[in-house]
Amino acid sequence: QVQLVESGGGLVHPGGSLRLSCSASGFTLDPYTIGWFRQAPGKEREGVACIGKSDDTYYLASVKGRFTISRDNAKNAAYLQMDSLEPEDTAVYYCARSTYCSGYGLSRGKGDYHYWGQGTQVTVAS
């Protein structure tokens, strides 16, 4: 059974950092792309970043330079390091699996990412 489980969310002040983890089970992560998405209340889900099997990456413009996506195939896990967090980053963050990493794939969301975790809440507030 393909399963993705996010963890690491929490409450931080603006300018703070969080590291989200995406733990995969039921498959070997190595050949797959992992994407991170987020959804804020009242807003549509948006793709934040993805990392492909060759460690190629793509970032949403608003997070580029602040967020870093990575993977550890030996641990069957992917991560999203979030620095310089802003209130606008507040959302439920999801990881999901695809077969390629691109801005197009991120924009398609569930059209290209077919397995999703349950989400973890990130709140950035003073």
Image: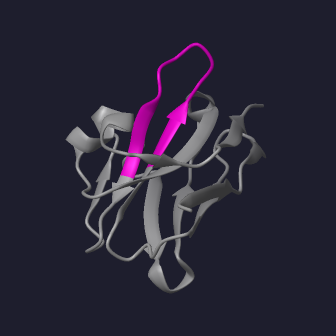
What residue sits 52% from the left and 76% below the top? 76
Please identify the residue farthest to the front as the structure is shown.
1
Percent coordinates x, y for residue 15 in the rendering? 63, 45
The image quadrant that residue 11 belongs to is top right
Q: Which residues are magenta?
A: 36-49
What residue sits 56% from the left and 47% below the top? 84
What residue sits 34% from the left and 66% below the top? 32
What residue sits 21% from the left and 39% below the top? 104
Please identify the residue farthest to the top as the structure is shown.
42
Q: Is residue 54 left or right of 25 when viewed as pictured?
A: left
Viewer-closest of 68 and 49: 49
Q: Is residue 75 above or below residue 19?
A: below
- State the colouring used for the structure image: one colour
* Magenta stretch holds residue 41: yes
Please identify the residue farthest to the bottom as the structure is shown.
74
Which quadrant of the rendered structure holds the N terminus?
bottom right
**How many marks do you count on the picture?**
0
Viewer-closest of 102 and 111: 111
Percent coordinates x, y for residue 79 in the rendering? 53, 64
* Magenta stretch holds residue 7: no
Which quadrant of the rendered structure holds the C terminus?
top right
Percent coordinates x, y for residue 50 in the rendering? 36, 54
Percent coordinates x, y for residue 70 in the rendering? 44, 68
The image quadrant that residue 6 belongs to is bottom right
Q: Is residue 90 left or right of 47 when viewed as pictured?
A: right
